[in-house]
Amino acid sequence: MTQFSRRSLRTALELPMDTIDDLIARPLVDLGATDTVGVSVSFAQAEAAFVAELGRASKEGRWEDISDRWSPLRGHCILDRIDRNWVQSAPAPLNQFAQVELQRLRAFVNIRLFASAPLQAETADLVEGAFKNLRIAFDKEIAGCTDAIDLGVSTTAWLGRTSGIIKLVTDNWLKPAKPELKRAIGQALNALKAHVEAVLEERRAAIQATADQAALAREREDLSLAGVVRPLGSRHPLRQTFEEIERIFLSLGYSVVAGPEMETPYYNFEALNIPEHHPARDNMDTFYMAAPFANDAQRKPSRGGAQGKPGAPPLLLRTHTSPMQVRTMEKQQPPVRIIVPGKVYRRDNPDATHGFMFHQIEGLAVDTDITFCDFKGTVEYFVREFLGPKVKTRLRPSYFPFTEPSVEVDATCVFCGGKGCNVCKQSGWIELFGAGMVDPAVYGFVNYDPKKYSGFAFGLGVERLTQLKYNINDLQLYFQNDVRFLRQFA
Ligand code: PHE
């Protein structure tokens, strides 16, 4: 089948009238019609020639002439010549195709000649018979319409205002009819018109529905097809530790807050009871920068040291999350129960246990009547939740300028259960994190009454805690983004 309607070709063609006789004198192959499309084009030319001749003839009242040339009732009419020169001389299997085309053309010509000829009917019965012929021809033609283009051609052929068959019948049968037959012809014509319109509409709807169905079928998604499988990523082990620790402290009524990674020396050191030349600053060397810290400079020129202004101390990348203790207490009165997850920075050369950036989670609880027991209970609860119920904890005296007393929290080694192994260097204990009771000196910086309030703080190293959980022996692995490493935590 061709991709387009053969009949649509006909409407597209215009042909000078005298050439049709030349064309039909020659075999199809000579005309270049060597395939079905070529044959269709030739027949379309013949049809166009007929339409043109019919139009001209009926305008000039020469119906007999055209009938002579085209009607198969006369010998040597154009249709017979087409049969002889085009159809019978065509090579197989094109001749079969041409045969079908000829039948189609015959029907086309016949029905128009019939509708254009004066009505040869003297009685109402004969009128009825004539209309019945039209109706049969119409029904046959419509039965062959399979697509919207075919249907459009037929619609124009029958209902077209200038040369549609209904119009031809009106002009040639109804108008010149004798008065006694006018009524019968009029009624039959109306009935035919109604039939034509109804059938065309019905057909149009059916073709549309089929087209819709076809479009639906074409566009339907095949849900049984295997999809594109995208490999699922996994949460980074550090992120998993963050979430686990947040879950534990949220369950204790803590809230999670975040603070700036770029800090003033005031919050990072001074307000935490680490004055300028304090030795505790030695292992907290960090990155300094001259970027302005507009908000804090304006809000606290005296404390923040007018950051960004000439001669002001430079800003730094925070060395721990502890500055958020001060920032939080400045903003709110007790009770305070917060944890602060985030990145911290130190001037360290990267190796298996050091990096210039790592992660901490700060913890701070301040209220009336918070004792060392609360502190110990909280720490023990956290360690058991995080490392497992069998783990024991111990506190070792330590020192931080902003806690008093200060401790290191140790846990029994998760790898040997306390018996002693390589990881715990045969001691049975591993160091977890630093903590302590908030030094009353810190309350002095935030206007808390040290007689009324007490509290504790801790600073968890996220890399370290993750390492203990998964026995990761190289800190750098966390940041190299090697999927072989990361996949193990999916
Ligand atoms: N900020 C300390 C550090 O980074 C840890 C810490 C936090 C210690 C809170 C005690 C209380 O080493």
Image (cartoon, rainbow, N blue to C red):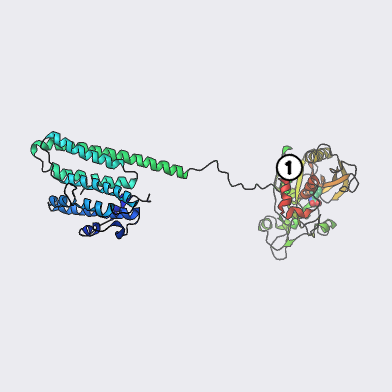
Q: Circle 1 sits in a helix, a strand or a loop, which is it?
A: helix
Name the residue located 28 percent from the left edge and 42 percent from the top edge: 141
Q: Where does the image place residue 45, in percent across and percent down from the top left?
A: 26, 55
Q: Nearer the viewer, residue 288 or 477?
A: 477
Name the residue located 61 percent from the left edge and 46 percent from the top edge: 229
Q: Where does the image place residue 192, in percent across and percent down from the top left?
A: 21, 38
Most extreme residue toward the left is 179
Specify the quadrant that holds the C terminus.
top right
Name the residue located 31 percent from the left edge and 58 percent from the top edge: 29
Q: Nearer the viewer, residue 170 or 368?
A: 170
Q: Nearer the viewer, residue 91 or 59?
A: 91
Side of 274 relative to 327 (left or right): right
Q: Is mark 1 within 8 Å of ligand 1?
A: no
Side of 24 relative to 298 (left or right): left
Most extreme residue toward the top is 125
Q: Where does the image place residue 463, in percent across and percent down from the top left?
A: 77, 50
> Can residue 342 be seen at all in this image of the molecule?
no
Q: Which residue is mark 1?
A: 244
Side of 237 relative to 199 (left or right): right
Side of 353 relative to 149 (left or right): right
Name the residue located 74 percent from the left edge and 61 percent from the top edge: 288
> Can residue 59 be seen at all in this image of the molecule?
yes
Amino acid, disc 1: Glu
Q: Where does the image place residue 88, in percent across and percent down from the top left?
A: 28, 52
Most extreme residue toward the bottom is 310
Mark 1 Cα shell of 10 Å, populated few (<14), some (14-19), many (≥20): some
| Number of callouts | 1
